[in-house]
Image (spheres, grey):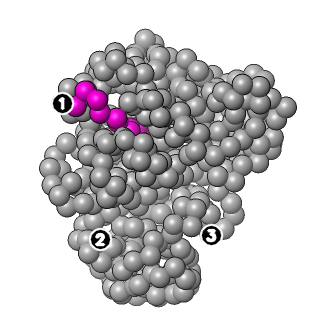
Amino acid sequence: MQELQQQLRQQQQEKQQQAQPPQQPATASSSTKVSRDLFSETARMRSDLARYMYLKEVMQQLTREDRLIDQQLLASVEDELGLYSEAVYDFPFDNRVQTPVPLPSPVDWQPTSAVDEIVKLATDRHIVMINEAHHDAHTRELTLELLPKLRAEGFNYFAAEALVNTDTDLMKRGYPINTSGSQYLHEPLYGDIIRQAIKLGFQVVSYESENDVLADREQGQANLLYQKVFAKDPKAKLFVHAGYAHIDKAPGNLGGSIKPMAMLLKQLSGFDPLSIDQTRWRDIGPMPDKDLYKRLTAQFPVTDPSVLISRQNGSVWSSDPDRHDVDVILPPPGHQRRPHWLTLNGARVPRVVSTDFCQSQLPCVVEAHYANESDDSIPADRYTFLTANSINTLYLRPGEYRVIAKNRDGHNLGQRNLTVDGSESSP
């Protein structure tokens, strides 16, 4: 719970620095005065669904300040429950601190695959850092695509902010479980990042600091990464998946003169990180047509995570070059029942599920676990049914699964075995 509290405080301080978009999203700041400790109230609940229901139920009882915290916690748990569109809608956080004026023009820039360009840029680097928005799993897709490419380039360590330092059996087990990290790790794509990193041969490391003060937390994270990686292996190549402004290479976005983790790790290791921001240019929910993201994607209608390349000299566009090297543009998620990017470029196939799994108990979570993993493993995918007589889709890699339905108390309502062979059908 302490790790989750630290992350929220960090995000709150980042929000203080943000430029307000045309339609103001929900925000919170480090000066927000709250009367209820929603962390403590939800920390020991039996399931993610129980946390979700509680946060929904208490929303109308809260003060405005408490409601902002509730919104953020609710969006995070929606993300963890597979309610991806709802998570973005319920917390439309825009963290574009410094807006480039004017925006890039197609006359001078052209879009290209973020994966391919990042791999080129990473060739001579020892550190690659990419960030995420904690409540938006779309910011995890690119990390999954980069893992095998960077492994082929000699990257041999992978660090994830959501991991805790106490799961000493993670590498031997080969997959994360519910206690392997913070609640963010309960989201299936985050779990798959860890699973795939281990499978590819990365040495997976945790680096979360126990320091409560933000500046000390940044230093603590940098120290742990240095001690666990470069102090032991000076020629190591490290890929880091972190949140928001931890990847910045200069102060500013964390408030005042606080030095971000990436900047501090550069000082400790002597290696300049390739810093990739993918939280600025993403869909954050219903916004006016003049919203910067809408304007940018109208000029550059990308269909996959993309970067912009200069037509003059081939350089990669960054909206804030002092702090990060690359801006990634994420495409709109589409209007299907669930976002189209969940296919992971065809690596996963859709399988239809319905409330028939739920045995007339709603809401319920339907989740698919790999057949060779324990019931407390992070599921390969999950979806939460809130209304009766509903259908939806799980996205799964070919393989063998246990599909389990659970109620608010975390009790199993039923289980079926499922084989995914690459074709679409119902279990």
Q: Nearer the viewer, mark 1 or mark 3?
A: 1
Q: Residues within 10 Å of mark 3 (few under 14, many from 20)?
A: few
Instruction: Name the residue: 62% across, 69% down.
Output: 337
From this view, report whether residue 69 is shown above or below residue 273: below
User: Which residue appears farthest toward the top when viewing the image?
Assistant: 257
Question: Which residue in the protein does label 3 denote?
Answer: 337
Mark 1–mark 3 distance (CA, rounded to whole Å):
47 Å
Determine the secondary structure under disc 2.
Answer: loop
Question: Which residue in the protein does label 1 denote?
Answer: 232
Amino acid carrying label 2: it is Asp
**Boundaries of the magenta span:** 232-243
Q: Nearer the viewer, mark 2 or mark 1?
A: 1
Q: Nearer the viewer, residue 338 or 380?
A: 380
Q: Nearer the viewer, residue 337 or 103?
A: 103
- Mark seen at residue 409: 2
How far from the left and from the top, in percent, is residue 293?
A: 71, 39
How far from the left and from the top, in percent, is residue 417?
A: 35, 86
Amino acid carrying label 3: it is Arg
Mark 2–mark 1 distance (CA, rounded to whole Å):
44 Å
